[in-house]
Image (cartoon, coloured by chain):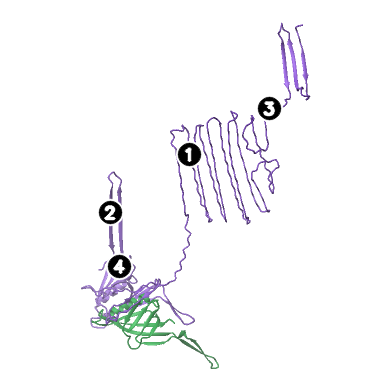
Chain colours: A green, B purple
Amino acid sequence: MFFLRAPYPAIQSSVALPSPGWGDSVGLTSSLQILRAMDGTRYTYVHEKGGRKRLQWDFTIARHKALELRAFIRSYYRSQIQVIDHNEDTWVGYLINNPFEHAADERAVDFPGGETMTITLEFEEAE
Amino acid sequence: MALRVTRQFGEALGAGDGSLRVTRQFGEVLGRGEGKLRVTRQYIEVLALASQTHEKSLTTAMSITDNAHVPERHERIEDTLSLTERVPATFVEDLLDDLGITQTTSRTLPYSLTSELDLDDPFVYLHNVGEHISIHESLTFTQDIDFESGLFNVMETVMNMSDSVNEIGPRYKTVWTRIHLYQYMPSKFARAESTINLVDLTGRDYKAEASSTISLSHDMWRSSTPTTDMTLVQSLDWGKTKGIPAQYLNLEHTIGLHGDWARAMMNELGIGHSLTYYLPDPCDTKAYTPFIGESTVSDSPTAPDADLPFTQGLLEGGRFLLLYPALGESTDVVELRAPNLDNKERQAFTRINRETRGGKLSVFADPDWPKINTLVLSFSGLTKTEVGEIHDFIQEHLGEEIGIIDWEGHQWAGVITTPNERAAQDGKHGFTLTFEFEGVLVEEMPSGSHMSVVDGFTHFFHKARSLSNELDLSQEAVETVESP
């Protein structure tokens, strides 16, 4: 189970999504720049960004759930949201996709809406 | 000798003892006569009189005794009061009146204290000795300035009182004018002014009373300037006392509060509460099941709609349509089959992402900034004719807003942003064409742009003996959006 809750911290709305597909990722947002002097001395310039992490999940969801997610994004694209992922980890940050792309992939007769859609969510911690 | 022609002249020009009179005598006999006839001219002058009990004129200078009783008969009584003002003010020694006028200047500050007192009691005729005449005028001026801070202040009290009695007869007449002015200024003030004009006129000497009583009271504890102007006129021109109805004019003006200066201070602390919930259900990850709680936070975004936003599916026999114009009655329509699967919808928002020096991510977006929806649609199995119709449609309305009825029955309004996409022939009779469309759902467009609702209200009122009201209400709703 995967939850998107917003706006944080005064949470009003919750969206329950199925667990994302394989290939979800998490990583730091820090950056490093290396400069080398003429005598071979190495200088590193880092931008730690507070140790914030960036995550990405791929979802395959029913058409109706996609519409619900579409409405959620439209309401809270500029708000902090809380994510409780499939590993029960809690994250607070922003959805940073631009644009959000909803793709209708397959027919799914038994699913609400008759289709399945895929969407990728990119998320970055606020601090 | 009967005839006497005589001229005598005698003068006594100086005062003598008790028997001497200052007298000038002159006698002439101008002709003769017979018997006792005498033609005589006599002239006698008395050049000086001793003391008399009746005096023609009596002048008393600087007498303010207001002692109007008449023990002796005087034709004229005159009082003259002269006040000499100095710094500090003093009075001449001969003044015997205690007027209570004190002028004091303590320093060389630009003070100006002025008191003018004019009392005029003309007493013209008095027919009968012993009649009681009483004229009272009482004036009390009080000007107190306790503290002078250097500002220019003016305190002025001007009172003009005139009581005129033309005739004193056996009839009783009373004329009263009473004015009480009281100005009290405990603190800083801008201006306080009281002006009262009382005019009582009675035309004839019948017993009549005209009374005007005015009480003006201004209580000011703020630097405001309330103004009260009152003019009362009672005129009795002619007629006897009886039969003239009394006229009473009572004006009562009560203002309890001129303004409310209550200062309402409010601090909005931004305290609110929010609530969300989740009800486990096997379908909550598939169906449209948003869990919308409540929030009283003022700047909280608008929550998503709790209901499924659209009705799914085309009407029976309906097809994918390209329309022109986007709204209203269509003049150019292209019908297509439904697009292939793998169609996409892109939601793009205008946002500003910033990172603080400490690494905190801040995202800001004004809700009025553009939100762009883009549809990526791919059509397969098109005939050559359909490809031609699409190309003609795009060419004809290039850059113009067109409408789309999609495969789910949703209406969109926007523009085709990829007019130069080529149609590929991927079968013997089939073509595939892909284009991108940027627009918005018609349901998300601002209300009122495609529908106008007019309420008309007409009210007729006829003035006639038989009153009637006609009320015509008309409501007209005009919908300009028509699905083809």
Which disc number belongs to residue B234?
A: 1
Per the image, label 2 sits on a secondary structure element best described as strand
Question: Which subunit holds the residue at mark 2?
Answer: B
* Sequence order check, earlier mark of 2 and 3: 3
Same-chain check, marks 4 and 1: yes
User: Is the Cβ of the residue at disc 4 closer than 8 Å to that at disc 2?
Assistant: no
User: Is the Cβ of the residue at disc 1 closer than 8 Å to that at disc 3?
Assistant: no
Same-chain check, marks 2 and 1: yes
Which disc number belongs to residue B472?
A: 2
Q: How far is the residue under mark 2 from the one under mark 1?
A: 54 Å
Closer to viewer: mark 2 or mark 3? 3
Q: How far is the residue under mark 4 from the one under mark 1?
A: 78 Å
Question: Which subunit holds the residue at mark 3?
Answer: B
Which disc number belongs to residue B327?
A: 4
Label 2 CA crowd tier, 10 Å (few <14, some 14–19, many 20+): few
Above-or-below relation of B102 to A21: above
Per the image, label 3 sits on a secondary structure element best described as loop
Three-letter residue code for mark 4: Leu
Residue B403 locus on image (x, y percent): 30, 71
